[in-house]
Image (cartoon, helix red, strand yellow):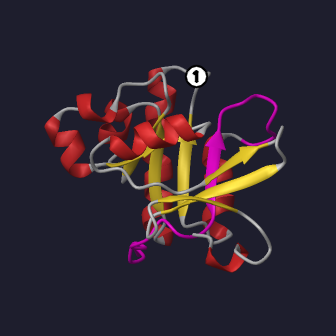
């Protein structure tokens, strides 16, 4: 039986990672995430070959469909398409979203890694991109988040914590 997909990215996002330091492979990590109620499971396969990554992706896609979670693939829109993922998460050195093939752009949600305000602003200028997340300024001991309704960054304080996305 397939669960109804969640319509929002809100909730727990889990990276199912192929790092050898982890006790379980990405499929087992994804299974635990689904059992734990994750809203999104993202396959991060940086160390394995294409065949194994594709096999993991297809198995994780089945798990996420069964529990109603969204499924994203890290870095690889081609793998995301083959796995029938809901989206792809692209880093700063990956193919820019504007260069994705039209079919991929029409079907896949696109996430983007950002590490500072300049990268966030560039990401916001890209088409079909939603911003979810925080900017951590460890040197300045500040945490800021982008308030889409206001169109600017807001410094996180206990008084604004309830308004954070």
Q: Picture coordinates of residue 77 (x, y %)?
A: 35, 34
The mark total stands at 1
Q: Which of 22 and 10 is in front in this view?
A: 10
> Which residue is labeled 1 in the image?
48
Q: Is residue 140 left or right of residue 52?
A: right
**In the rendered image, is residue 55 in sight?**
yes
Residue at point 34%, 42% (across, down): 125
Q: Which of 54 and 91 is in front in this view?
A: 91
Q: Picture coordinates of residue 136 (x, y %)?
A: 73, 46
Q: Is residue 118 left or right of residue 85?
A: right
Q: Which of 122 and 72 is in front in this view?
A: 122
Residue 8 among magenta residues = yes
Q: Is the magenta stretch mostly helix, strand or loop?
A: loop
Residue at point 42%, 64% (across, down): 65
Residue at point 50%, 70% (across, down): 67
Q: Picture coordinates of residue 151 (x, y %)?
A: 44, 61
Q: Residue furthest left?
A: 102
Q: Read off the magenta span.
A: 1-24
Residue at point 68%, 80% (across, down): 162
Instruction: Write down the quadrant of residue 88 in the picture.
Output: top left
Q: In which quarter of the image is the N terminus?
A: bottom left
Q: Picture coordinates of residue 129 (x, y %)?
A: 36, 50
Estimate how packed mark 1 is, as few (under 14), some (14 to 19) or many (20 or more) residues with alpha carbons within 10 Å. Answer: few
Q: In which quarter of the image is the C terminus?
A: bottom right
Task: Tell me if residue 133 comes above or below residue 22 in the rendering.
Answer: below
Instruction: Write down the quadrant of residue 160 in the picture.
Output: bottom right
Task: Tell me if residue 97 comes above or below residue 30 in the rendering.
Answer: above
């Amino acid at each position: 039986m397939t669960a109804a997909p969640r319509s929002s990215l809100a909730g727990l996002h889990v990276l199912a990672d192929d790092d050898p330091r982890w006790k379980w492979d990405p499929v087992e990590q994804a299974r635990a995430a689904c059992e734990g109620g994750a809203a999104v499971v993202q396959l991060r396969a940086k160390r394995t070959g294409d065949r194994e990554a594709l096999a993991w992706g297809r198995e994780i896609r089945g798990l996420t469909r069964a529990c109603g979670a969204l499924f994203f693939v890290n870095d690889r829109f081609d793998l995301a398409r083959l796995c029938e993922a809901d989206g792809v998460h692209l880093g700063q050195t990956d193919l820019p979203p504007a260069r994705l093939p039209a079919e991929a752009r029409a079907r896949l949600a696109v996430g983007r890694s950002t590490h500072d305000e300049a990268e966030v602003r560039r990401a916001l200028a890209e088409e079909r991109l939603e911003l979810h997340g925080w900017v951590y300024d460890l040197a300045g001991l500040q945490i800021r988040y982008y308030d889409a309704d206001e169109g600017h960054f807001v410094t996180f304080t206990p008084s604004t914590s309830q308004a954070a996305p």
